[in-house]
Amino acid sequence: MTFLTPARPWHSYLQWMFATVVAALFVVGAINVFIDPLGVFGSPRIVGINASKPYLDHHRELARWQAGRRFCSSVGIFGNSRAEIGFDPENALFANRRLSAFNHAIAGSDANLAYRQLRWLQGAGCLPETIILGVDFIDFLGGSSPTPLAPAESDPAPRLDARFLAETVFSLTGLRDSLNTIWLQWARYPATRTERGFSPLYNYVGEVEQSGHYVLFRQRAEENARNWLRKPRRLQPPEGGRSGDEQAVEAFLDLASAAGSTVYLVIYPYHAQIRLMLERLGFGGLFAEWKKMIVDIAERQGGGKVIVWDFSGISPETLEEIPAAGDRRTHLRNYWESGHFKRELGDRALARMLGEPGDFGVRLNGENIDRWLAVDRGRVQSLLATPGPLQTEADDIVGSVQRR
């Protein structure tokens, strides 16, 4: 009996399949490195192809670190989404003073990550000479117990390792991000971030046109109130002593002060709606106590080079009128919603920090803190007792959350 020999042995098919897979991976990897959605490879930015980068929710620490190290800026901005969205490192005030700025802030992060970022920059010889650190009352609320801060040798800066390459370069996830980047170049309101780490939140323009500012304010306000009520009403842990957030801010200031950097500790410009809600929910006294804690930390740790600015007071800026329900035409100048301010208001805050004249914000120290707290809380309580749309809306939000 005669058997037919296959025209192509199995090993030829295997070789062909292997070569095809390798070629496909190479092509996908080349595309992803060229488009560089995360901006970690420093690939050229070409208008219409990859000049604008998408706002991605993965590998954020690595992406911010790679870009920050590449710029090695003299001014560093740190904090959470409020700083990421509100403080533009390309503000002309920096260039006019021959300063180069970078926004290291990451949404959802706290002072512990800011401290780690600063330490990574120190290790690369890029610790900024001027630092802006946003501090958030909500992070401190609850008084988390401190944990030992990881030593530098056990907490190295993020690296472009094999796992990263597998997840973002030689993968369909990476290809999806690259295709999204190309599409983003032609989107009307893209969710993007700039080369210097700023997130302008253009996508919210579309949200306002579709739903109106009122919906954004209402949804975020109810979400905030529920989050606040879930937390213990304290700033220190049950066992006493410093909280984890207080410890992280102190470590951050110690590191910056030892390097001779000037630090601006910023209390964010919350919309007055937040201040009224905090007061109505019984957090007003704790908020004042927290501000005094921030000043005490600055006086204790700063060696005279830590400056506290409070932009959360009741002012024409923070009292910007919230459009009525159904109004989809009005675009606010200062706020996206009560917790996130726009670049325009962030520019006003930066101007004050950098010495420009104006009446927005109050510089705090050990001498004026008690007087300012009395004035500040008095204005909030007076506003809360004055009938009007803002007071009515704040009461309605608080009531709806408490009834659930």
Image: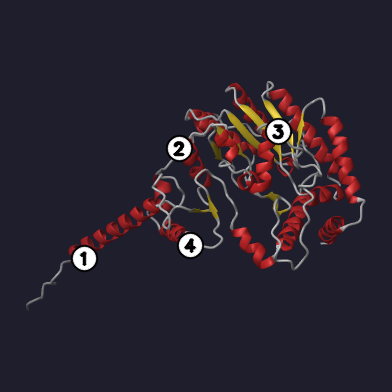
Label for residue 246?
Answer: 3
For the residues marked 2 and 1, what is the alpha-carbon distance in whole angstroms?
Answer: 45 Å
Q: How is the image coloured?
A: secondary structure
Question: Which residue is the site of mark 2?
Answer: 70
> Mark 1 to mark 3: distance in Å?
63 Å
Quadrant holding the N terminus = bottom left
Q: Is residue 225 above or below residue 10?
A: above
Residue 345 or 60: which is nearer the viewer?
345
Disc 4 target residue: 186
Marks 4 and 1: in contact by CB < 8 Å? Answer: no
Secondary structure under tag 3 reads helix
Measured from the top left, where is residue 228 in percent x and y?
A: 77, 49
Q: Residue 233 location in percent, x, y?
A: 81, 43
Q: Residue furthest bottom?
A: 1
Label 2 Cα crowd, 10 Å radius (few <14 / some 14-19 / many 20+): few
Q: As shown in the figure, which amino acid type bears the numbered disc 1?
A: Tyr
Earlier along the polypeptide chain: callout 4 or callout 3?
4
Q: Which mark is residue 13?
A: 1
The residue shown at (46%, 40%) is 66
Residues marked 1 and 3 touching at CB (< 8 Å): no
Give the label, 2 or 4, closer to the camera. 4
Could you tell which of marks 1 and 3 lies nearer the N-terminus? 1
**Mark 2 is on which residue type?**
Arg
Work out whether mark 2 precedes mark 4 in sequence or the reverse, and give the earlier one: 2
Give coordinates of residue 46: x percent, y percent: 40, 52
Q: Quadrant of the C terminus?
A: bottom right
Q: Amino acid at mark 4?
A: Trp
How far is mark 4 from mark 3, CA to CA? 44 Å
